[in-house]
Image (cartoon, rainbow, N blue to C red):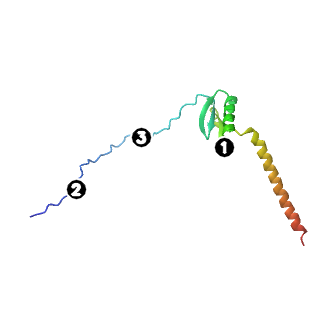
């Protein structure tokens, strides 16, 4: 008896791609952004949250967020200039600068003291 050789054939049909005549239409993907209807926005971690008519109103809202959550990066975004303005906590800005200046002065004094002490040794 003769044995038949079994061949595997799939029931799937091969799909052929039709060539695209105009390649520019296939690659023209654009990300759509919603239009900015307000002139100023409060942005938290670079995500726009609320729109305001004036800069002062946006700054007041941003300061409220910054006081409640001081570790967040809060800015006021101007839609016309496409620019972010950083909002800092009002009470801590001057204090941290004074601490930094005092620490730098103390370091300079310590280094100068060591140099003077080293120069006096024989």
Quarter of the image where one finds residue 62:
top right
- Please indicate whether residue 94 sits to the left or right of residue 74 in the image: right
Split into 4 quadrants, where in the image is the N terminus? Answer: bottom left
The residue identified by callout 3 is 26
The residue identified by callout 2 is 8
Mark 3 and mark 2 lie on one chain; the one further toward the N terminus is 2
Closer to the camera, 62 or 80? 62
Q: Secondary structure at mark 3?
A: helix
**Mark 2 and mark 1: Cα distance apart in space:** 64 Å
Q: Secondary structure at mark 1?
A: loop
In the rendered image, residue 11, in percent from the top left (x then y), is placed at: 23, 49
Depicted 111 relative to depicted 68: above or below? below
In the rendered image, residue 78, in percent from the top left (x then y), is placed at: 65, 33
Q: What residue do we see at 61% from left, 40% from top?
A: 46
**Mark 1 and mark 3: Cα distance apart in space:** 44 Å
Residue 84, visible in the rendered structure: no
Mark 1 and mark 3 lie on one chain; the one further toward the N terminus is 3
Query: Looking at the rendered structure, which numbered label has been put on residue 71?
Result: 1
Q: What residue do we see at 68% from left, 41% from top?
A: 70
Query: Looking at the rendered structure, which numbered label has been put on residue 22?
Result: none
In the rendered image, residue 69, in percent from the top left (x then y), is placed at: 66, 40
Q: What residue do we see at 28% from left, 48% from top?
A: 14
Split into 4 quadrants, where in the image is the C terminus? Answer: bottom right
Q: What residue do we see at 17% from left, 61% from top?
A: 5
């Amino acid at each position: 008896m003769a044995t038949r050789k079994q061949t595997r054939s799939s029931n799937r049909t091969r799909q052929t791609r039709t060539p695209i005549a105009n390649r520019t239409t296939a690659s023209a993907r654009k990300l759509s952004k919603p239009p900015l209807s307000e002139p100023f926005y409060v942005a938290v971690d670079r995500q726009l949250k609320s729109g305001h008519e004036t800069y002062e109103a946006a700054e007041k809202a941003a300061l409220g967020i910054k006081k409640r959550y001081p570790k967040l990066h809060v800015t006021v975004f101007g839609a016309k200039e496409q620019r972010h303005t950083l909002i800092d906590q009002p009470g801590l800005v001057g204090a941290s600068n004074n601490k930094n200046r005092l620490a730098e002065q103390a370091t300079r004094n310590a280094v100068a003291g060591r140099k003077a002490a080293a120069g006096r040794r024989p």
